[in-house]
Amino acid sequence: MDEPVPLFAGTPEQRLLFLQSIVQAADNAPTVQDALHAALGRVCETMGWQAGRLQFSAQAGDLALRTFWHLRDPEQLQSFRSLAEARRNATDAGKLGAAS
């Protein structure tokens, strides 16, 4: 079995600071949705990603089928987001068609 690849491969102190920054951002957020946006933003910033998407399944309760985005440059990356959403919708439609 392959070893899992760590999300953030810094020193233990760096990992702790990273996790603490996510907790602090979540604590300061007025809603669960804002906390999720903040956490996703911290992950993307730390990893150097220009874009990130957090997507929940149908079994996620109140967050079912919700998608949250982080875009470093929303104007520049809007086409990326549109493409990703179109691909997701096409995949979902295929799954629904296969289940019928």
Image (spheres, rainbow, N blue to C red):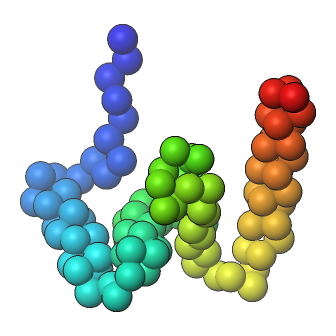
Instruction: Report the front residue among 99 and 39.
Output: 99
For the N terminus, the quadrant is top left
Instruction: Report the front residue among 26 and 3.
Output: 26
Can I make out residue 14 in this image?
no
**Is residue 7 found left or right of 74 in the rendered image?**
left
Question: Could you tell me which residue is drawn at 77 percent across and 75 percent down?
Answer: 78
Q: Seen from this angle, which residue lies furthest left?
A: 13
Q: In which quarter of the image is residue 2?
A: top left
Question: Could you tell me which residue is drawn at 65 percent across and 82 percent down?
Answer: 73
For the C terminus, the quadrant is top right
**Is residue 57 found left or right of 4 in the rendered image?**
right
Question: Could you tell me which residue is drawn at 47 percent across and 54 percent down?
Answer: 61
Instruction: Report the front residue among 79 and 23.
Output: 23
Question: Residue 24: image x %, image y %?
Answer: 21, 78
Question: Residue 66: image x %, image y %?
Answer: 60, 62
Question: Could you tell me which residue is drawn at 34 percent across and 88 percent down?
Answer: 30
**Is residue 93 found left or right of 4 in the rendered image?**
right
| In the depicted structure, whether residue 39 falls above or below residue 12 | below
The number of callouts visible is 0
**Is residue 10 found left or right of 85 in the rendered image?**
left
Question: Residue 80: image x %, image y %?
Answer: 77, 65
Question: Residue 11: image x %, image y %?
Answer: 16, 53
Can I make out residue 7 in this image?
yes
| In the depicted structure, whether residue 96 falls above or below residue 9 | above
| In the depicted structure, whether residue 94 falls above or below residue 69 | above
